[in-house]
Each structure stands twice: as structure tokens, then as C-alpha cells.
């Protein structure tokens, strides 16, 4: 490939955190590796911000796309690209990691160099997933993102971390195996124009020569793999246990970014490859998604553990995204792409607050807390804003995406929208109930000694709150980034 520059943004977004992670492994001093990880993540954020300046591929194609020979005789090139959806999700990943590192900077980990090295390798894998334009490259980074998460959960998690991680492994390994079978079958039925060989390239798999029956069963192989990752009911049972037992910084990555791998993959691969099965099975998928929304919301109302509370809240929001994708509507898909970014910002903010409360009080039990507003008013203000964004209050970032997704669902089927709409009421119930019980009322013996949060913690929460209001009041930049991607996907479906 003839290029005028020596390296592109997708490559930098992948290789820099990868190299930074490898360097972190050899840094023995804890404070040094923490500072290195923060610096590396801020540099990655800078690369992402600069890449957004060149988001118009018609003018700066070579800055945002690259293709090199990789497994040449298998028909796989190392092809990376940044379209609108890729820009949004790499930006989310780039924002999230420095926020997580700074917010949890006071947490001490045994073998900190290994912990931070694995976190940066996870970031590299996530960047690869969101930029891969070759199906085998996509699968490679899919695994690269997940494997470090296993070790992070199993080594630095809670008391029941082994059981939770094993469940996480079984679910994700099963999904990955199903996807690999589907990838190989697709590959064997590709034949790019002008070539006599098979290929893993995006265009080749999009136009794979399959019968309707073949497309139907391969659709389910891919969908189950992605549904586990999101997760969608009934493939969700690994999530609450894993979120509860994983170290909080890892939970932030899993909940804020990694679940978006599944949502992203459905849009990137399932919609264009399987337009027929998508239309044939849309009612089944949307029905499961809506059931999951109501089920998770009802479970969230009864939760006494803050981590499990946030986990079930996340399942409800992801269910709406999955349902909106299968409406195959422009407004629904646009809403999903905006909501992926917004949900990531909001849920990471919720996890930061949960982590701060647990570290100061030693408990996550809602029934044991109360009156925190008297002791930490600034933390309370941040939490209330993030909580209101979580229930999609107008002028917050989540309102825009949820409004568009519900509009798409309403156009598809009124009754689906009506039932799913109950989750809005339920979200307000469980969120406001949690805020009232944890932050208001009288302080007790558990919360009496709680102190106001530090400057670094105020800084990262302030950044998230600014993003909440910025994209709630002016979401146009996200529309501009993703509109061409939505148009391209809809063209292939139709």
C-alpha cells in the first residue's frame, strides 16, 4: 500500500498502549508504574483527539486506514480503519483509561506492574477490535482484549473471584468458539472479485456466497457470541458475579467499554453479512432484549449490593441498544452509536462513586449506608448528576440516544416500545431509591467518618460531568461522526 506517512492513527491507537503495557511489566516501583500508566493513557487520549481532527476519510484517507500483508496465504491482511463508529468507540476507550487510572490511583495492588501492564494490554485489544477491517484480525483482537481481563479478575478480584472468573471464562470461551466456527465457515464461502482464493477481508465476508439456510445458522453462531459479550438476556448471568468480584478498575473497563464490543460487532458484522436472518429473527432478538430490560430493572430494584445494582442497571441499558439495532432504522442505529459513548461515560462515573464509597466505608451494602451528603457534599453532587444521566434526564447525554432508540423501536412495533418504556419508570425508581438511601437521611456509624473526595477524584468526575452536559446539550459532533457509518450499514441491509 502506497502511503505518504510512516504510521497511521489506527496503528498508533493499538501499538502505543501495547508497547506501554509491555514496558509496565518491567517497572518494579508501584508509584512509578502508576505514573507511567497514567502518562501512557493520556498520550493515547492525545492520539485519539488528533485522529478526530482527521475524521473525514475523503480528505485524509491514509491517516485513518492501513492494510499490510499479514497471513497472506490465508487471505488475511492486517487491515485497520477508523470510520465514524470506530472513532466514537476508540475515543471512549481513550477517555476511559486515564479517568480510571487517576480515579483509582490510591488503590494499591500486589504486583502492580503486572496489573497495570494487563490493563494497558486490554486497552490495546479494545482499540484493535474497534479498528479491525478484516474478520480474522477482528477475532485476534477480540481475544487479546478478553484474555488479560481473565487474569485481572482471577488474581486481583474478591473472595469469590475464582468461581466468578470461571463462569466468565466458560461463557466467553463458548461464545468465542461459536464465533470462530462461523468465521471459518464464512471464509470457506468467500471468493473476492477477480480472485480464486478465499479471504477474511470485510468486503469478502460481506458478500460470502451462502444459501439462506446457511446464513440462518451462522447468524446464530455470531449473535450468541456477541450477545454473551453485551450481555443480552438470557446470556447475562456471568455479568453480575464478575462485576461484583472483579477489581473495580477492571469492572469499569468491562462495563464501560468491553460490553460495547458486542454491540459494535453486531453492527459491524451481523447486519451487513446477515440482512436476511436479521429481518427473519428480529422479533425474537427484540423480544429477548425487552424481556431483559424489564427483568434486569426489577432485579436492580431489589439489590442491596451497589456493584450488583450497577451491573443490572447496565444490562437494562444494553438491552435497549440491542433492540434498537434490530429495528434496522436510521434513527435507532444513530441512537445506538451515540448511546454507546454516553453509556460508557455514565457507567464509569457510577463505578467510580461506588469504589469511593466502598474504600471509605468498607461496605457496598445499601442498607448499611446513609447520610453521605452531610459528609461529602461534592461527591453527592457528582453522583446526583451521573444518576440523572443514567435515567436519561433531558439535557444529559443519555437522553439523546435513548430518545432516538425508543423512536426507532416505536416505529418498528408500538407494543415493544410500550413494554420497553416501562424500564424508564423502573430506572427512575431504582436509581432515585439508591440515591436517597445511600446519600440522604442521617449519617450512621458506618458513614460517620467518611471524608470529602480528593482533588484527583474531583477532577475525573468533573470531566465526566462536563461530557454528560456537553453531549446532552450539543450532541451534533457525534451525529456528524456516525451518520456516514449508519448510511453505509443501511445501504447494505437494503
Image (cartoon, helix red, strand yellow):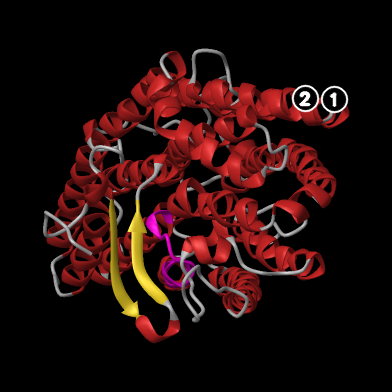
In the picture of the structure, the residue carrying the numbered disc 1 is 414
Q: Secondary structure at mark 1?
A: helix
Which residue is most to the right? 415
Marks 1,2: beta carbons within 8 A: yes
Determine whether, in the image, residue 151 is placed left or right of residue 243: left
Residue nearest the viewer, comparing 305 with 259 = 259
Q: What is the CA distance from the residue labelled 1 to the residue labelled 2?
A: 5 Å
Against 381, is 236 above or below? below
Q: Main secondary structure of the magenta part?
A: helix
In the picture of the structure, the residue carrying the numbered disc 2 is 410
Determine whether, in the image, residue 156 is placed left or right of residue 277: left
For residue 401, which quarter of the picture? top right
Against 327, is 315 above or below? below
Against 298, is 476 above or below? above
Q: Residue at x 82, y 68 (%)?
A: 213
Q: Where does residue 90 sit, x and y in percent of width and height?
A: 36, 47
Q: Secondary structure at mark 2?
A: helix
Q: Give the residues in magenta.
A: 130-142
Res. 3 visible in picture = yes
Label 1 Cα neighbours within 10 Å, binned few <14 / some 14-19 / many ≥20: some
Query: Could you tell me which quadrant the C terminus lies in?
Result: top right
Res. 379 visible in picture = no
Q: Where does residue 283 sit, x and y in percent of width and height?
A: 84, 44
Q: Where does residue 23 sit, x and y in percent of width and height?
A: 16, 70
Determine whether, in the image, residue 15 is placed left or right of residue 350: left
Query: Could you tell me which quadrant the N terminus lies in?
Result: bottom left
Q: How many marks?
A: 2
Q: Where does residue 399 sit, x and y in percent of width and height?
A: 56, 21
Residue nearest the viewer, comparing 107 with 336 = 336
Residue nearest the viewer, comparing 100 with 274 = 274
Q: Residue at x 64, y 73 (%)?
A: 182
Amino acid at each position: 500500500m502506497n502511503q505518504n506517512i510512516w504510521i497511521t492513527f489506527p496503528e498508533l491507537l493499538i501499538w502505543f498502549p501495547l508497547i506501554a503495557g509491555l514496558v509496565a511489566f518491567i517497572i518494579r516501583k508501584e508509584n512509578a508504574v502508576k505514573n507511567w500508566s497514567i502518562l501512557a493513557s493520556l498520550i493515547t487520549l492525545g492520539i485519539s483527539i488528533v485522529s478526530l481532527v482527521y475524521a473525514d476519510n475523503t480528505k485524509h484517507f491514509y491517516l485513518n486506514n492501513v492494510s499490510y500483508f499479514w497471513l497472506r496465504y490465508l487471505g488475511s491482511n492486517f487491515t485497520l480503519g477508523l470510520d465514524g463508529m470506530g472513532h466514537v468507540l476508540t475515543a471512549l476507550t481513550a477517555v476511559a483509561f486515564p479517568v480510571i487510572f487517576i480515579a483509582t490511583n490510591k488503590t494499591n495492588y500486589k504486583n502492580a506492574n503486572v496489573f497495570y501492564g494487563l490493563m494497558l494490554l486490554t486497552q490495546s485489544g479494545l482499540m484493535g477490535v474497534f479498528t479491525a477491517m478484516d474478520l480474522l484480525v477482528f477475532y485476534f483482537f477480540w481475544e487479546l482484549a478478553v484474555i488479560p481481563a481473565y487474569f485481572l479478575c482471577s488474581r486481583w478480584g474478591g473472595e469469590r473471584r475464582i468461581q466468578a472468573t470461571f463462569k466468565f471464562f466458560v461463557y466467553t470461551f463458548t461464545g468465542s468458539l461459536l464465533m470462530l466456527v462461523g468465521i471459518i465457515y464464512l471464509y470457506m464461502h468467500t471468493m473476492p472479485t477477480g480472485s480464486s482464493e478465499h479471504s477474511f477481508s470485510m468486503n469478502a465476508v460481506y458478500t460470502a456466497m451462502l444459501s439462506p439456510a446457511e446464513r440462518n445458522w451462522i447468524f446464530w453462531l455470531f449473535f450468541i457470541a456477541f450477545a454473551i459479550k453485551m450481555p443480552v438476556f438470557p446470556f447475562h448471568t456471568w455479568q453480575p458475579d464478575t462485576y461484583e468480584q472483579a477489581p473495580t478498575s477492571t469492572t469499569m473497563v468491562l462495563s464501560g467499554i468491553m460490553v460495547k464490543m458486542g454491540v459494535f460487532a453486531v453492527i459491524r458484522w451481523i447486519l451487513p453479512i446477515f440482512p436476511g436472518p436479521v429481518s427473519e429473527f428480529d422479533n425474537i432478538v427484540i423480544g429477548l432484549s425487552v424481556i431483559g430490560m424489564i427483568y434486569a430493572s426489577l432485579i436492580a430494584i431489589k439489590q442491596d449490593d451497589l456493584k450488583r445494582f450497577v451491573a443490572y442497571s447496565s444490562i437494562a441499558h444494553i438491552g435497549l441498544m440491542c433492540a434498537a439495532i434490530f429495528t434496522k432504522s436510521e434513527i435507532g442505529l444513530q441512537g445506538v452509536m451515540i448511546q454507546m459513548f454516553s453509556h460508557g461515560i455514565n457507567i464509569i462515573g457510577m463505578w467510580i462513586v461506588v469504589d469511593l464509597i466502598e474504600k471509605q466505608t468498607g461496605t457496598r451494602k445499601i442498607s448499611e449506608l446513609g447520610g453521605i451528603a452531610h459528609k461529602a457534599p461534592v461527591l453527592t453532587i457528582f453522583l446526583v448528576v451521573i444518576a440523572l444521566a443514567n435515567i436519561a434526564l433531558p439535557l444529559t447525554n443519555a437522553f439523546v440516544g435513548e430518545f432516538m432508540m425508543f423512536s426507532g423501536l416505536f416505529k418498528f412495533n408500538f407494543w415493544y416500545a410500550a413494554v420497553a418504556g416501562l424500564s424508564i419508570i423502573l430506572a427512575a425508581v431504582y436509581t432515585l431509591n439508591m440515591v436517597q438511601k445511600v446519600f440522604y437521611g442521617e449519617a450512621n456509624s458506618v458513614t460517620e467518618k467518611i471524608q470529602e473526595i480528593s482533588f484527583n477524584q474531583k477532577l475525573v468526575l468533573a470531566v465526566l460531568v462536563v461530557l454528560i452536559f456537553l453531549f446532552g446539550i450539543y450532541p451534533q459532533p457525534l451525529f456528524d461522526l456516525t451518520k456516514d457509518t449508519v448510511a453505509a450499514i443501511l445501504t447494505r441491509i437494503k
